Image (tube, grey):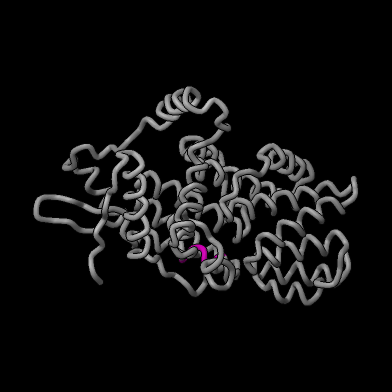
Amino acid sequence: MDSLITAAARALATGDPLGALKRVALRNDAPALALRGIAMAQLGDLVRAKALLRRAARAFGPKEEVARARCIVAEAEIALVSRDLSFSAKSLDTAQAALEGHGDRPNAAHARHLKVQRLLLIGRLDEAERALAKFDAAPLPPALRAAHELVVAGVAMRRLRIKAARAALIEAERAARHAGIPALMAEVESTALVLNTPAARLIAPGEERPLLLEEVEALLASGALVGADGFAGWSAAKVALDKRLKEILPRMPKWTLHDLRRTVSTQMHEKGVAPHVVEAIINHISGHKAGVAGRYNHANYSSERKAALDMWAAHVMSLVSKRPFVVVAKAA
């Protein structure tokens, strides 16, 4: 490995993508393409990053299995950040096996974390928890330890175990600072904001107020709420809906519940909702929150999200009831 490649890799490890690009921006050999791809990902240009990593994976020779596997893992990470679940889980499994077989434990561990994150995104929380339970995070380097604790915090928040989520975020912050990677520290800060952002509204006689996740957890534990368990029959409902759709639309393509995110995003954009508000609603990390911008922009756009979701509710109700459904927004 030549000195420029080594220097570029060190720059990326410390969160300095511009420093890395200064050394390899004009090179098209496989290692340089891979480093350029990672640099572009750190800068938030995910489309170009994915293209560069694919070129790098093709450019590595048959004896460079580890390098190809690392490219696949990096591409999978980009797909998850952009909430693109179309990447091949089987390819990630193969890459993980190759990395483990060659003793690259840190990157193999990273591949396992990406698989857990994918399970979280598609709602398979039990599987994600089982996978995490098998993990020994102690030997991980700081950057991967931070990523591990972020996943643990994500599971805890979804389970409404807020004390455990806070503990994981403290560990994630400590590891991220030790790693010295600004983008990773920003990700930890952004995740921690979820715990201090209203997640629900309590509606009771004479009272309506926003609730933090911690307050939701306490209310559910108190048993004071009626019907607080929420809807739990998604899988059965999907089967019934598919059966009904097949009767009405025989050529309806196969779809998943996750596809509804794309429908909501497309229709909200069509109806004039600002792109950064749509991204906040579907929890995308791009545009106004990607790369360096995300380090400084911690806005949650709560009032804009509420207005957009009220509009969407009105639209859905008008389709279901086949009559206009009007939502009156409060004056600012």
From the image, give the main secondary structure of the stretch colored magenta.
Answer: helix
Q: Work out whether residue 155 or residue 51 is closer to the camera in this orientation and state it.
A: 51
Residue 214 in the image: above or below residue 102: below
Q: Residue at x 17, y 56 (%)?
A: 208
Where's residue 182, x and y in %? 57, 71
Q: In the displayed structure, does residue 79 sit left or right of residue 268? A: right
Residue at x 55% of width, y 58% of height? 146
Identify which residue is drawn at 39% across, 50% down.
157
Looking at the picture, how far across and down is residue 254, in whole percent?
A: 57, 32
Q: Is the residue 189 above or below the residue 129 in the image?
A: below
Q: Nearer the viewer, residue 94 or 284?
A: 284
Point out residue 58 in the picture as x, y percentages from the top left corner: 84, 50
Q: Quadrant of residue 20?
A: bottom right
Q: Is residue 251 above or below residue 146?
A: above
Is residue 250 found inside the magenta-colored segment of the image?
A: no
**Is residue 187 inside the magenta stretch?**
yes
In which quadrant of the rendered image does the N terminus lie? bottom right
Q: Spot the residue most to the front.
A: 323
Q: Which residues are magenta?
A: 184-189
Which image quarter: residue 82?
bottom right
